[in-house]
Amino acid sequence: MASEAAPEGAPAKRANGPALTAQQVVLAADAPLRLDSGATLGPITVAYTTQGRLNADKSNAILICHALTGDQFVSGPHPTTGKPGWWDTMIGPGRPLDPDRYFLICSNILGGCLGTTGPKDINPATGKPWGLDFPVITIGDMVNVQRLLVDHLGIDQLFCVIGGSMGGMQVLDWAVRYPERVFSAMPIASAARTSAQNIAHHEVGRQAVMADPDWCGGRYLEQNKRPHRGLAVARMGAHITYLSESALTRKFGRSLQAREQVTYGFDADFQVESYLRHQGITFVDRFDANSYLYITRATDYFDLAQEHGGVLAHAFRNTPVRFGVVSFTSDWMFPTLESRDLVKALNAVGANVAFVEVETDQGHDSFLMDIADYHRIVHGFLQGAADHRGLKKS
Amino acid sequence: MTGTSSGRPAPLVGRAETGSGRIRVDLQLIADLVPVGSRVLDVGCGDGALLHYLTKHKDVDARGIEISRDRVAACLNQGLSVIQGDAEMDLADYPDDAFDCVVLSQTLQAVHDPKWMLEQLLRIGRLAVVSITNAGYWKNRVTFMVEGREPFAVHRDETWYDTAYIHPCTIRDFVDLTTEMDTRIERCFALNPHGAYREINPRSHWANLTAVQAVFLLS
């Protein structure tokens, strides 16, 4: 499905400008990729989308890194859900990510389940789905696969690598691993390492998946089962961390779901319960349970400081990259403090960094929202970077 | 300087003009003191008027720190590398000699520990450009003597209890502090209420009486 072009003629298309083109490519075919774990993997299929046109000197490419459960369908109607892409409001003519000016690339991450090699694909050694035989991956491994894609596209230097949440971790990893290949980097609602609290949330989600008898020790595909209940519970728990107490109160309060009074039972009496159940149920249709395990694990392992002698600033020494860091006041999953730690480290090495905390009550998911202040800031940062890079205006 | 129509001293924070290539006279003076092509940190950079000017006209690698979210957003919208932060805490995170020049414009008297701030500026930058509002200006003295009122807030259309101007000082006070800190005043300029400026002897009593603002280049 990922290799088909996005549906054409949809009404949302003009708002997002030139249509999204979806493709797949097989990479690491000649030499397998060495993973951080020491294992090797290859060939690797990568599903990606592009939007806009790469300019003559290939200087206008922006790599968009998606978050934990995101995918490469950043804008326009999603081919499986029919809903607008996760960054639909950010992308389009006159919007911060303007495909009339930039060449936008987004690939499904390694370990994902929408076209890029992951645990639900067939292990060539056994002819069966990988399941838990898939090697454990890291954010760095995801970035290395993206780098193979960028090589394949013939792009030496990305104008910008941008992404929110776990996408922001990929952004930072790019900037640290390949500083010469990144002109500017915009980690949004993110951090240079995963906090104990987030590892804890991830662990609850994984345990929920693994506690579902239909998970079958990870081999559910061969048994033609799906651990839907466990994955839905994992999603419900995670979804709470994406919101904020005030947003939940504002949206739902203690309102009851289509009833006048509580039922003295365990049905979804409250609207917030009904909402969460809906989030859980719709998620399992589009996401693979083992992918969820692998990707949350990759996030847990992310710690840029640890890889540089425990000092985050060392990761950025002499970096030529222009950084634009954004956080949100009500984000308790990736609180502003973590962005500040990142900014401190960047300042300590004299890096070029802009930072702003956007005021909103929408929690971690703010990075997906159409918030005017936030979009203006992304637009301004990219505009400034484009001026410095000498990109022509569209 | 951009006095109000009544000729009163400029507000401690906030900048009058942006974008059009013209900047406030005191900012212009500061800009003239910044070496071409240098690395500059503007502490309390407001909406980025000075940084914008320095980037455009002096080929400066310009950075800023500003506490107000809205002003930081305004800076980012101009493509400036500005971080939202509290200089009174965050300057400690910058390494020694990180910048050629650090600018503190009309902010020193609003911080809780001006001496610490000045030490930080000179630790982070090889040069520091600092502008202050001169509490020794004769109108302040007259207001105090004749009206018997706290003059600095009065002349800023503020009240003594909510002014940001918590550490008023005169040119002479400031010069004494630099002496105490073993800081060298490379150059010193006085601005009169009509926006004209001239280089002065920092110990000049006349300047301390007639200047509404002073700009110091320190090393």
Image: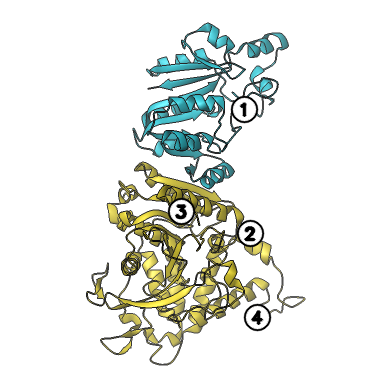
Chain colours: A yellow, B cyan
Chain letter for mark 1, please: B
Q: Which residue is mark 3?
A: A392
Front residue (pair A11, B10): A11
Mark sitting on residue B11: 1
Residue ID at (54%, 15%): B170
Q: CA distance from mark 3 to mark 1?
A: 39 Å
In percent of width and height, residue A199 lies at 42, 64
- Tell me if residue B174 can be seen: no
Three-letter amino acid code at disc 2?
Ser
In the shown orientation, is residue A296 left or right of residue A336? left
The image quarter containing residue A263 is: bottom right
Front residue (pair B36, A169): B36
Q: Considering the image in quadrants, where does the N terminus of chain A appear? A: bottom left
Q: CA distance from mark 4 to mark 3?
A: 58 Å
Q: Which residue is mark 2?
A: A246
Have a look at marks 3 and 2 and say if they share a chain.
yes
Point out the frontmost of discs 1 and 2: 1
* First in sequence: mark 4 vs mark 3: 4
